[in-house]
Image (cartoon, helix red, strand yellow):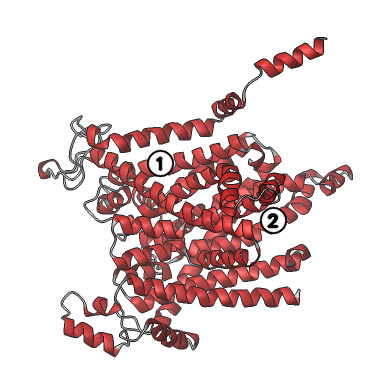
Amino acid sequence: MLAFAIRRVVLAAIVAFAVSIVGFGLLRLSGDPAIAMAGPSGTSADIAHIRHEYGFDKPLPVQYWNWMRRAVSGNLGDSYYFRMPVTTMLEQRLPITLTLGVCALLFALVLSLPLGVLAALRPNSWMDRVALTLSVVGQALPSFWFGLMLIVLLGVMFPILPPSGSGSWQHFVMPTIVLGYYATPAFMRLTRTGMLEVLQSDYIRTARAKGLPRWRVVLKHALRNAIIPVVSLAAVQFGFMLGGSIIVETVFGLGGAGYLAWESISRADFPTVQAIVLVYSGFYIVLTLLADLANAWLDPRMRG
Amino acid sequence: MEPVAITVSDVAFGPTPARKLLRRIAAHHGFILGAAILAVMVAMALLAPMVAPYDPNHQDLLHRLTPPIWHAKGTWAHPLGTDQFGRDYWSRILFGAHISLMIGFIAAIISGLIGTTLGVAAGYFGGKIDAAVTLLLTIRLSMPVVLVALAVVGLTGGSLSVVIMVLGFLLWDRFLVVTRSATMQIRKTGYVTAARAVGCSTARIVLSEILPNIINPLVVVITLEMAHAVILEASLSFLGMGVQPPTPEWGLMIAESKNYLLFDPWLIGIPGTALFLLVMSINLLGDGIRDVTAPEARN
């Protein structure tokens, strides 16, 4: 287990390093920060000055090294647009995004686990069909449009929720529904498949033959095993949700890191965009690492 | 004698594989529904220049915000109404189908080429190549698609070709996963060993033994990724980082009508429904193809 853990941590470190290079390179190739900083009225002399001042005239590897050296010590640079340290902004914004992510994950699990189990208990029943329809719709529903429709319905026609902003817990309800529903189909399918498989196994038949009540067999014996792959999917889905939060937060004007990503991209605020790419990827890498370690701990066959 | 006669007639008159496939398709409601909606969408996209009653960018400021036909004030001159610039919504929806399908299709083909090449190489050669490709996949999966696509398109300044390239270069992960494991299985089969034993070149084995046998799962992934690309592209355009105005693109149409949400909700309702139906039809068709070609993979 220790050998597996060490190997897995080293791999995560390599991936994190590679992601930081790819992220840095991609953004630098996409645009010129000096031109973006000089703004529309900047002359070529201004641009040359900025280029020299901020070190954009140095070779990319040198710029990367300088950026990374500071990033490791917790300094992600200053935002060009907001004129404040990126780290400070992330400290304010990330809790909102993480709250939204956790709420959406819980919403998705609360919706998909019971539906997935019920669908697996009676394949091809009406319950299975309801679950299937919900998942087909969920996969095709563009989250930005679903969000706007919810605003029309619950914010305007029946004004029970605030249509946008981030002041109170009510502001999180609609974004949670939209982001959570986006993740539901994958959970539902995996729960259903896992349950179908487990329900056919010998120990379930034994448990039933012993005369245990049906609900007990389903909840205690079957679900516990069917749910193991759901744990690693949750880590992956949480990473996807961070990406999805950019769209959802922008639609609802929820001032988290996702909204900050959109704001900084539309203002060509390079240090902020770079930091968000790094932080979001970091979350994904750490979460999948933890999920793999948890799986290996639960199931020794995974330690290969 | 009797049993032999039955066997012979079975062999002679039993359903051919093609007919069996057709029967499975006919019995699969999702496949039929998806194919039907997608056929309508493709027809709309291809015939848009001929069928559209107006130029999608023609502004008629005297007839702004005409409601659609099911509304009391609707008129047949503009069946889906007009937007805030008096542009005919039906014409814009038609041309929008063209753009969404084109972006989705080309992006899926580009990512399919990248993912399949990497996946087949990893699955066929294994060892160090497999390890390198797997590392590449892990790196790609660690970078959130929406964020990277938004940043690259936004910082480059959005255009149709940039959007297509960025999506094409981001969505290859599922192609890789599927072709890698399929190739690994096929590599161990007798016919590949036989082909190698008679001295076939690697290129020939890949092209004539492996690719034909992974084509079914590949088609399924193409549809899934095409749907994915369509929805992502609309999201980018909605956020103002994709295709630029005045292009008749569904996500952009929704973004432009956001301020009319209150009094003219159909302005966002119509392009959103079109987008939903397109993505759903592609997904249904993909699931349908998977079910009828590999019924054992259903669950």
Q: How many marks?
A: 2
Tell me the subunit letter for badge 2: A
* B45 or A106, nearer to the observer: B45
Q: Is residue B201 above or below residue B25?
A: below
| Side of A189 relative to B169 (left or right) | right
Q: Is residue B95 above or below residue B115?
A: above
Q: Position of residue B227 (x, y in %)?
A: 44, 47
For the point 55% across and 29% down, the residue is B25
Residue neighbourhood size for the residue with mark 1, other residues' Cα within 10 Å, grouped as few (<14), some (14–19), many (≥20): many
Q: Is residue B92 above or below residue A268?
A: above
Residue that numbered label 2 is attached to? A227
Residue that numbered label 1 is attached to? B278
Q: Position of residue B276 (x, y in %)?
A: 41, 43
* A275 or B113, nearer to the observer: B113
Q: Position of residue B78 (x, y in %)?
A: 20, 34
Q: Amino acid at mark 1?
A: Leu
| Side of A82 relative to B180 (left or right) | left
Tell me the subunit letter for badge 1: B
* A171 or A282, nearer to the observer: A282
Q: Amino acid at mark 2?
A: Ile
Secondary structure category for the residue under label 2: loop
Residue neighbourhood size for the residue with mark 2, other residues' Cα within 10 Å, grouped as few (<14), some (14–19), many (≥20): some
- CA gap between label 1 and label 2 equals 33 Å
Direction left: furthest residue: B62
Asked if badge 1 and badge 2 are on a common chain, one would say no
Instruction: Tell me which corner region of the image, top left, top right, bottom left or bottom right, holds residue A36.
Output: bottom left
For the point 87% across and 43% down, the residue is A211
* Residue A53 image label: none
* A46 or B134, nearer to the observer: B134
